[in-house]
Image (cartoon, grey):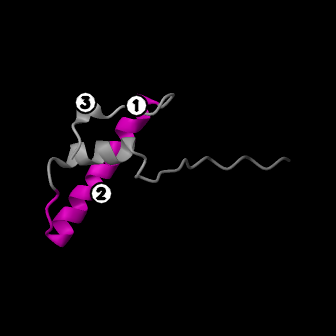
Amino acid sequence: MTKLAALIPPQGSNKYELCVIASREARRLNDWSHRTGESIQGKVTAAALERTIRQDVPFLYEDAPLPLPA
C-alpha cells in the first residue's frame, strides 16, 4: 500500500469531490468485505482514497433531464 502523503490529487481536481467519491468507495469496499468474509489489507478508507486518486474508481454525474420546450 502507498503512503497517503505520497498520493497527489490530479491537477485541477476538486478535493471535496474526491472526498465524496472516496467515502462511497470505502463504503462499497466495507460492504464487499462483510459479504465475502475477505479482509482488505490496511484501512478501508486509505485504500478507497488511493483507488480514487489513481482514478481506479469509475464515477459519473447524473444530470437532471432538461425540460422539454413548450
Residue 12 image position (x, y, % from top left): 51, 28
Q: Kindly identify the residue that appears in the image at 48 percent across and 29 percent down.
A: 11
Q: Between label 1 and label 3, give the one nearer the viewer.
A: 3
Q: How far apart are marks 2 and 1 (CA)?
A: 19 Å
Q: Is residue 27 left or right of residue 34?
A: right
Q: Between label 2 and label 3, give the one nearer the viewer.
A: 3
Residue 15 image position (x, y, % from top left): 40, 29
Q: Which amino acid does label 1 sit on?
A: Tyr
Residue segment shown in magenta:
14-40
Above/below status of 43 relative to 6: below
How crowded pointer 3 is (Cα within 10 Å; few <14, some 14-19, many 20+) is rated as: few
Q: What element carries label 1?
A: helix
Q: Kindly identify the residue that appears in the image at 15 percent across and 54 percent down.
A: 41
Q: Kindly identify the residue that appears in the image at 62 percent across and 47 percent down.
A: 64
Disc 1 target residue: 16
| Magenta segment main secondary structure | helix
Q: Kindly identify the residue that appears in the image at 38 percent across and 41 percent down.
A: 53
Discs 2, 3 touching: Cβ within 8 Å: no
Above/below status of 18 relative to 37: above
Q: 67 or 22, which is in the foreground?
A: 22
Q: In this view, does 64 lie to the left or right of 47?
A: right
Q: Is mark 3 on a helix, strand or loop?
A: helix
Please tell me whether residue 29 belongs to the stretch shown in magenta: yes
Disc 2 target residue: 28
Q: Which amino acid does label 3 sit on?
A: Ala
Q: Which mark is on residue 5?
A: 3
Q: Is mark 2 on a helix, strand or loop?
A: helix
Q: Residue furthest right?
A: 70
Quarter-wise, where is residue 28 in the image?
bottom left
Residue 59 image position (x, y, % from top left): 48, 51
